[in-house]
């Protein structure tokens, strides 16, 4: 029974990854959103390492977020619409989080001592 669940998840993952990377007009594509989420998670992790209180780190983080949006060419209105879209489509949001988690796990594995670089 457990194996069939794993196979089902694998098949669904393959099916979801085969879908076109399209999104409704006016929001970030899935790949753009994954890139954004990865950047934000990594930045938040760095901010948590700073020797500041949570409130102070948050105040330092906000300008960084604005700079990152500018660097990536993302308007705040587009980002808000994108978050709203994915909040209303939890299956698609879950797929994004799966990709983000896999990407972060891969990065972590590559940082471990003795890890071989992935081709």
Image: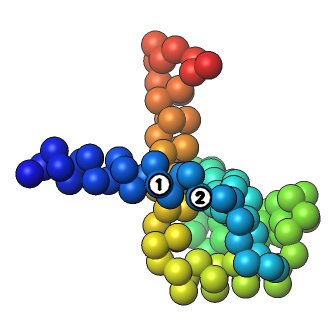
Give the percent coordinates (x, y) of residue 45.
57, 53
| Marks 1/2: CA–CA distance | 7 Å
Q: Are marks 1 and 2 in contact (CB under 8 Å)?
A: yes
Asked whether, in this view, residue 18 is left or right of residue 102, the answer is: right
Residue drawn where x is 57% and y is 69% of the image: 54
| Residue 32: mark | none
Give the percent coordinates (x, y) of residue 75.
87, 75
Q: Which residue corresponds to mark 2?
A: 19
* Rendered view: 6 above or below 73: above
Instruction: Decide if residue 90 is in sight here.
Output: yes
Q: Circle 1: is it few (<14), some (14-19), or many (20+) Cα within 10 Å?
A: few
Asked whether, in this view, residue 79 is left or right of residue 101, the answer is: right
Q: Quadrant of residue 31?
A: bottom right
Q: Secondary structure at mark 2?
A: loop
Q: Nearer the viewer, residue 102 or 49?
A: 102
Q: Secondary structure at mark 1?
A: helix
Q: Nearer the viewer, residue 23 or 79?
A: 23
Tell me the quadrant of the picture where the C terminus can be found. Answer: top right
Q: Which residue corresponds to mark 1?
A: 15
Q: Quadrant of residue 24?
A: bottom right
Give the percent coordinates (x, y) of residue 112.
47, 24
- Residue farthest along the left direction in this orientation: 1
Give the percent coordinates (x, y) of residue 101.
48, 51
Residue drawn where x is 43% and y is 52% of the image: 13
Residue drawn where x is 54% and y is 52% of the image: 17
Asked whether, in this view, residue 17 is left or right of residue 91, the answer is: right
Residue drawn where x is 73% and y is 84% of the image: 81
């Amino acid at each position: 029974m457990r194996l069939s669940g794993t196979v089902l998840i694998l098949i669904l993952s393959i099916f979801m990854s085969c879908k076109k990377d399209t999104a409704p007009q006016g929001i970030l594509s899935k790949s753009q959103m994954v890139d954004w989420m990865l950047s934000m998670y990594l930045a938040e992790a760095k901010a948590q390492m700073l020797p500041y209180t949570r409130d102070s780190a948050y105040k330092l983080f906000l300008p960084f977020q604005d700079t990152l949006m500018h660097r990536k060419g993302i308007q705040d209105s587009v980002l808000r619409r994108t978050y709203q879209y994915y909040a209303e489509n939890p299956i698609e949001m879950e797929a994004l989080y799966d990709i983000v988690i896999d990407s972060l796990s891969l990065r972590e594995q590559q940082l471990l001592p003795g890890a071989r670089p992935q081709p």
